Amino acid sequence: MDELSASFVNEANELLESLEEALLKLENHPEDEEQINTAFRVMHSLKGTGAMFGFEELSAFTHEMESLYDQVRSGKRKVDKHLIDFTFKSIDLIRLLLEKPDEETTRVQKQLLLEEMASKFSGEQPPSGQEQKASQGVSQKQKKQKTATWHIRFEPHQTILQNGTRPLYLLDELAEAGRLKAFLHTEKLPDFSHLIAENVYVWWDLLLVTEKNENFIKDVFIFVEDESRIEIKKVTDTDLLSLPGAEKEMEKLRLKESIDMQKLQQ
């Protein structure tokens, strides 16, 4: 395993440890929204970053697990012993997919778990009783989540490519969450004679219109936050990109100036 893959595996194992802690808490408090969100975010992060580092099988499996916990967050499925036990077994598989992705035993184990998932968790399972009330609380909060516009400044370190990270993959993931407007900054580009092919000299100001919250955006950058400058700020609780004059006003981001919200909303 090369150095880049080993670094991802270490980060992924830390995420799995946090998932195990969340599951232990959910055993006693299955309605705990914070722990449910932790489980979802771990799967979401492993899905996106796994694909970026070439762990395609891991990414595909965690996508399925992410969908299960998204159903829980939206009130369409309850947290019960079956889901918790299955998630613990999934953690064991994910560790195999990290350490021994090409071995036959790993492929067999993955197929068995996918079959179990299809058997036990196909379709949606509306909660009942006390669990239904808790899940409905989560669902109501999500329904109240309105479209907002976020300003994200993403300045990756020059050597970020050497760690296996592909910045454009992160932008693609943001774009899948809503509407994304990217402003590319090139002022740090050196003269051609001083260019190093493996280095990144550009950075971005991004405007994202989405119903996702700040935690979702942070999770997109979870594996690059230590080697990048990342600023996240909510601009407005409306769809800024659809306002008249938005394109012209937003060009100010390229010049690192502030957007005049009053001018746009007149």
Image (cartoon, rainbow, N blue to C red):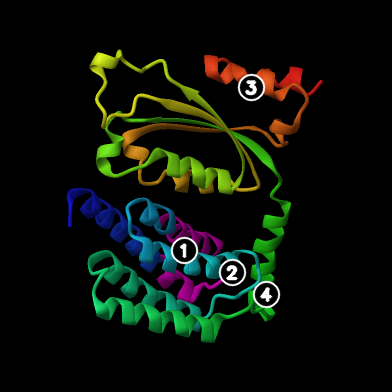
Residue at image mark 4: 132
Q: Which circle's residue, 2 or 4, is located before the other in the chain?
A: 2
Q: Are the residues tagged 2 and 1 within 8 Å (C-beta)?
A: yes
Q: Which residues are magenta?
A: 22-45
In this rendering, the answer to whether 109 lies above or below 251 is below
Q: Amino acid at mark 4?
A: Gln
Q: Are the residues tagged 2 and 4 within 8 Å (C-beta)?
A: no
Q: Amino acid at mark 3?
A: Met
Q: Residue at x 42, y 74 (%)?
A: 87
In front of the other: 246 or 151:
246
In this rendering, the answer to whether 195 lies above or below 241 is above
- 77 left or right of 96 in image: right
Q: Main secondary structure of the magenta part?
A: helix
Residue at image mark 2: 72
How far across and how far down the image is residue 11, in percent? 29, 53
Q: Amino acid at mark 2?
A: Val
Residue at image mark 1: 39
Q: Which type of secondary structure does the marked residue at label 2 adopt?
A: helix
